Amino acid sequence: MPRFLSRRAPRTGPPAAPLVRPARRWWRTVLPLVTLAVCVLAGVAVLAGRPSAGEVWRSPAGVAEAALDQPAPPLASAPAGPAALADPAGPIGPAVAAPGSVSHPAAPAPGGSASPMLRLPGPVPSAGRGGFRYDDRAGEVLGTSGRLRRYRVAVEPETGEDVRAFGTAVQEALAGPGSWVDGGRLRLQRVPGGAGHDFTVYLATARTAGRMCAAGGVDIRVGGRPYTSCRAPGKVIINLDRWRSSVPHFVSAGVPLAVYRTYVVNHEVGHQLGHHHERCPKPGRPAPVMMQQTLFLRGCVANPWPYLDGRRYSGPSL
């Protein structure tokens, strides 16, 4: 029986709606890429803020470094000392921002250009009564992980320095980036004078610093006068002479006072944390923070940080 192909009757209703495909959700593809780009940029920004071995110090915008309106005179408080004190610093290149700030008002330099403060002008008090005033503020916890060590800040009144300004400068030096907390094994926090603590950071006149250091078994004299700073058990003792005047080889090389202050805090706190003196690894390289940069640089470049490029930077043991 023959088969016939039947024709379908034409539809009389309205035409079928065209097939509409859902819009391509392009954002599902783009959003992860945008997120990745943001993360990469954030990572670059974080790394850019870290000190690097190629850039050891620079004067940062926003740091209150006062400018001198005349060349710095010779250091009045610096003794003649051994030949090591005259060791040339060598070329000083640009580098990372030093967080330690100088708490003195800025003054315009000739011609309207600003130059970094290398040392503070005027006489430096050399002796006090040995009493101290403490910063009464608690600071934020510095660092993200590791053992928490609490420290106090104290200033001998006869220094003429403000205890809160000193406390802020110490905290900025220890905050980094580039400070001891960058290793992830240590956190630091400033606590008020009457609180429990692991150590105290003192700012003392030269004679008081000499007595305190000697009591802890450290002789800070150069040429018969108390010259350097020191660490005694539970005490980080900063010599006012150095805090205000830096050292000749930093001054002659144009290293800002803020950089020296950051260095001396990180160096002496490094002793408190158990680190020992180190040597210059190679001329032209950054000086390790545990090198005795107050006395010499031996061809290295001034460096206030224990961490460079996010890694612990050290030199040969002394």
Image (spheres, rainbow, N blue to C red):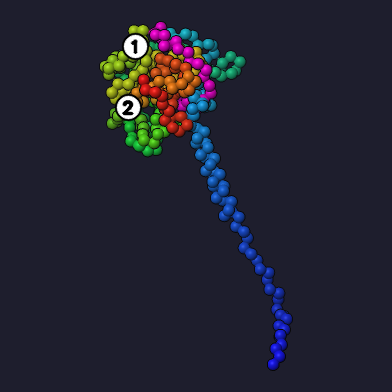
Q: On the rendered image, what quadrant is the C terminus found in?
A: top left
226 up-or-down from 273: above or below? above
Please tell me how crowded label 1 is: few (under 14), some (14-19), or many (20+) other residues with Cα within 10 Å: some
What distance separates the C-alpha of mark 2 from that of mark 1? Answer: 22 Å
Magenta residues, start to end = 77-100
143 with respect to 50 (left or right) = left
Q: Amino acid at mark 1?
A: Arg
- Magenta: main secondary structure equals loop
Residue at point 28% right, 23% down?
233
The circle drawn on residue 36 is none
The circle drawn on residue 221 is 1
Residue 201: quarter of image: top left
For label 2, the residue is 274
Residue 256 appears in the picture as rendered: no
89 with respect to 213 (left or right) = right
Q: Residue 287 placed where, x, y %? A: 44, 22
Q: Residue 82 placed where, x, y %? A: 39, 8
Q: Amino acid at mark 2?
A: Gly
What element does badge 1 sit on? Answer: strand
Q: On the rendered image, what quadrant is the N terminus found in?
A: bottom right
What element does badge 2 sit on? Answer: loop
Q: Residue 203 placed where, x, y %? A: 36, 19
Residue at point 43% right, 26% down?
305
| Nearer the observer, 215 or 115 | 215
Residue at point 49% right, 29% down?
52
Residue at point 57% right, 48% down?
33
